[in-house]
Amino acid sequence: MEVCSIVYWTFRGLASLIIILSAGYLYWKTTRNKQLIDQIPGFKDWPIVGDVLHTGSTPSDFLEMVLKACDRSSAQGIVKIKMLEVPWVFLYTSDLVEKLQGSSKEIKKSYEYFSLHPWLGQGLLTSSGDAWRERRHMLTPTFHFSILKDFLEVFNEKALDLVEVLQRDHCDTDIEFDISTLVTLSTLDIICSTAMGVNIGALRDGNSEYVKALQVLKEAADSRPQKLLYYIDMVYNNTAIGQENNRCLRLVHEFSYKVIAERRAMKEEGISQSTGKLRPFLDLLLDCRDEQGNPLTDHELREEVDTFMFAGHDTTSTGISFTLYLLGIHPEVQKLCQEEIDQVLDTGGSISNADLNKLTYLELCIKESLRIFSPVPYVGRELIADTQFGDYLIPKGTAVFTLIMKLHRDPRVFPDPERFDPSRFTSENCTQRSPFAYIPFSAGPRNCIGQKFAMMELKTIVATLLRNFNIESVQSREELKINPALVIEPVDGIRVKLTSRQ
Ligand code: HEM
């Protein structure tokens, strides 16, 4: 009896001690982390609600608030926003950005990417840690130039389709229209052909169930993180938008699985998997092996194909549309591009890789457009260790974002940053610049795996359009409102008028 009582009291004593120590540690950690976060410049936030009272109701309002906070902290290059008690830290000078993006350890994506998980699973964009490292290692060879150069045939073909539709419906009418919608359908056709080897004809039939489902998924991924209650699956799945999202998820996943099954069967039967010599990414992924020699499962293949579909069409469409916009409000720059294009492509016919290399002035214009209108406005990480950024120690676990759109407007690096000036990217003007000062494709180990593909696509489409049309943008810079979603969107489209150059 006595022994039992001793054991009982010892156990209770130990349990109480553990609880007190844990509570003490938790209190210390919360207070310490809070103190560290509170030192970072930002608004004077309120207890518990943080900066919620400063945020408006739309993503643009939120971004405006972040930019206001940046202006207050000016040259320090770091601000924090607190949503309730949850801190988000934003970095926007190249030295601080280098510390985050350049790190081979800080590769964990922040929680805010959760809305993409049901769609993309543990694909390359959304995975972290060793799973990401292994996948990146496996997939990197599929983006080698020797493979990408074959995709030029698709870029040319789809560019001509776009020209045909524009010529038929919009050219020489003196009526403005939104060119970005058509460009998006065209880039969707490109990524479907190059990723899966499937021609979905989105440009000709933008009403297909698959195309509409992709649009729903993208909008849901953008809108879900904006409502705190939607973070809870049980709540979200019972809303109308959550149910529509789930219906579209099933449709898109079924489509990808069907294509995977078809191409796997073709491969097993030894049938040439594509017309001509073009091998879509999916065929290359079927041949990929991990370090133990295992191929990707259908589930893993689906994650990667869906990731390419998401990461590879809105981004390129935005890049093309905003380049056309800027050239449309700067006719003198547009004329210089056209002169170069006419000279390089003087024999007619499709654009070759050698031609692309010669379109150097066009490339400067595209780079400058990706600076002013970076398609991806910010990227986020969750710190895996306490890290010093300038004067501030940021605790492990904090969500830290590189605010690309603000970084690209640092007046010390890009004087008069709102001015469209392609000469900023001539090689002599780039030599002094930090590689982390201009990062439309992000930088460091988690940079964009598709950036060469993207630049080839952008150059081919823009060159083909400028070869055929003069473009006049009708919105001024002040009128062009932007929605800072995962990929930026022009709120009212990119409104232009086209005249034929023939
Ligand atoms: C103008 C076009 C593009 C831009 C501006 C762009 C930009 C970016 C950025 C900023 C990231 C980093 C995202 C982050 O850290 O959260 C990224 C990652 C990625 N991009 Fe792109 N991208 C473009 C086109 C493409 C294309 C065409 C593809 C595929 C065909 C692609 C596939 C990917 C993938 C798979 C990742 C994840 C890489 C990783 O984490 O290892 N992107 N892109």
Image (cartoon, rainbow, N blue to C red):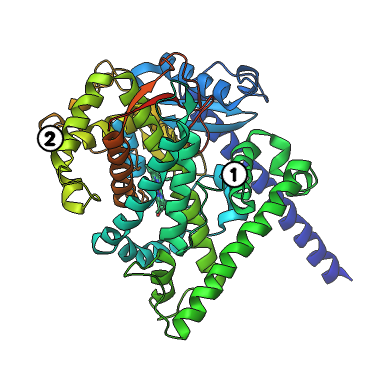
Q: Identify residue for label 2.
A: 427
Position of residue 52 measured from the top left corner of the image (x, y, whole percent): 64, 23
Q: Is residue 131 above or below residue 240?
A: below
Q: As drawn, is 413 to the left or to the right of 41?
A: left
Position of residue 174 measured from the top left corner of the image (x, y, whole percent): 43, 20
Marker disc for residue 215: 1
What type is the residue that disc 2 sits on? Ser
Marker disc for residue 362: none
Position of residue 296 measured from the top left corner of the image (x, y, whole percent): 48, 73
Report the mark closest to the observer, 1 or 2: 1
| Kind of element beneath mark 1 | helix
Q: As drawn, is 147 to the left or to the right of 185?
A: left
Q: Is residue 269 above or below residue 434?
A: below
Q: Nearer the viewer, residue 396 or 373?
A: 373
Q: As drawn, is 458 to the left or to the right of 361?
A: right
Q: Is residue 249 above or below residue 346?
A: below
Quadrant assignment, res 464 = top left
